[in-house]
Image (cartoon, rainbow, N blue to C red):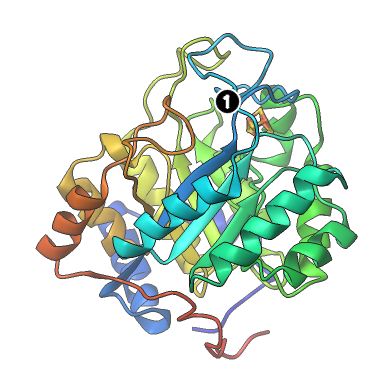
Amino acid sequence: MIVRYDWQEAEIREIYNTPLLELVYQAASVHRQYHNPKQIQVCKLISIKTGACPEDCGYCAQSSRYKTEVTPQALLEKETVLNIAKQAKASGISRVCMGAAWREVRDNKQFEEVLDMVKDVTSMGLEVCCTLGMLTENQAKRLDEAGLYAYNHNLDTSRDYYSTIITTRTYDDRLNTINNVRQTNVTVCSGGILGLGETPEDRVSMLHTLSTLNPHPESVPINILSQVKGTPLENQPDVPFWDVIRMISTARIIMPTSDVRLSAGRARLSQVEQAFCFMAGANSIFSSDDGHMLTVTTPCPGYDADSELLGLLGLSMRAPFVKKNQTIPQTI
Ligand code: SF4
């Protein structure tokens, strides 16, 4: 199978609606052509600046517009970040993602401090990803010079549904930041969230947008909404597990070289369900030493539990930078 950038929505819809076991079989087959199915990349998220975000993302515990249990926290000291990264590395983690609850990056002292963190964590031999909000091309270049490996900027949902969830920026703002990152050597991490009240059509539409970016995002996180008390989406129903499988499988088939990350919401999946996700082509997870992802509102399994799970399934943790020099198969 070749890597395609000309997917039509109708084709993606057909894949998404394939009978489940057939879909998983097809996705698993594609996965084995492009990835080592015995390896999972394990990542650690660090919230380097928490809460008090001016944006109004309806799912987010860090928006200043909602009263949630998150306590705002100023930018962490570099030493604190380095210590967390060190512990993560000792536990086999190969990628550290640093998140700041900002609308956008500003050219100020705090950005200089983040650049310094990126440099030092990278020099520990870890892949570093940042998620800092909107970014100019020049800021992306500065992150690139600091050694940044990836920049996360999720599309979250479809273009049509986006303004139901977020009103303080547009879909095109998102795509613009992704495009700015693409002007550098920094890889792109962009995916979405299931459970925002979107329809299957919205999911197909978001996958269409991602899979027609050329090149595809190197990393595609699939998040399951963790309903946060105090946010507009606190009463959303749980996402059916098989919807998660459909999403992972479809992403795997249409973006075969990308890492598909089973991200937020994994804590509520059983070991068997997680195994199914790996079979369907998910090849990355987030693990944690403190029981949560970015904030206390999103639980995350711990290093020991994940190490046990991977061992049970005959999987191992992927080393850092394995994909950096990988040849991308023939493209059209
Ligand atoms: S998702 Fe990011 S941009 Fe949106 S409110 Fe939360 S921290 Fe702010």
* Residue at the spot 52% in from the left edge and 9% down from the top edge: 230
Residue 331 vertical position relative to residue 114 in the rendered view, above or below: below
Question: Which residue is nearer to you in this view: 54 or 278?
Answer: 54
Q: Which three-letter amino acid code belongs to the residue tagged 1?
A: Cys
Question: Which residue is nearer to you in this view: 228 or 34?
Answer: 228
- Name the quadrant containing residue 284: bottom left
Query: x, y percentage for residue 178?
Result: 76, 57
* Residue at the spot 88% in from the left edge and 47% down from the top edge: 107
Quadrant where the C terminus sits is bottom right
* Residue at the spot 83% in from the left edge and 60% down from the top edge: 180
* Residue at the spot 33% in from the left edge and 38% down from the top edge: 290
Q: Residue furthest front?
A: 79
**Is residue 288 toward the left or the right of residue 111 in the image?**
left
Question: Which residue is nearer to you in this view: 3 or 291?
Answer: 291
- Name the quadrant containing residue 278: bottom left
Name the quarter showing ligand 1.
top right
**Is residue 322 toward the left or the right of residue 8 in the image?**
left
Residue 184 vertical position relative to residue 16 in the rendered view, above or below: below
Q: Is any atom of residue 42 visible in this view?
A: no
**Is residue 196 toward the left or the right of residue 7 in the image?**
left
Query: x, y percentage for residue 17?
Result: 43, 50
Q: Residue furthest left?
A: 312
Q: Cβ(mark 1) to ligand 1 < 8 Å?
A: yes
Q: Which residue is mark 1?
A: 60
Query: x, y percentage for residue 295?
Result: 47, 30
Secondary structure type for disc 1:
loop
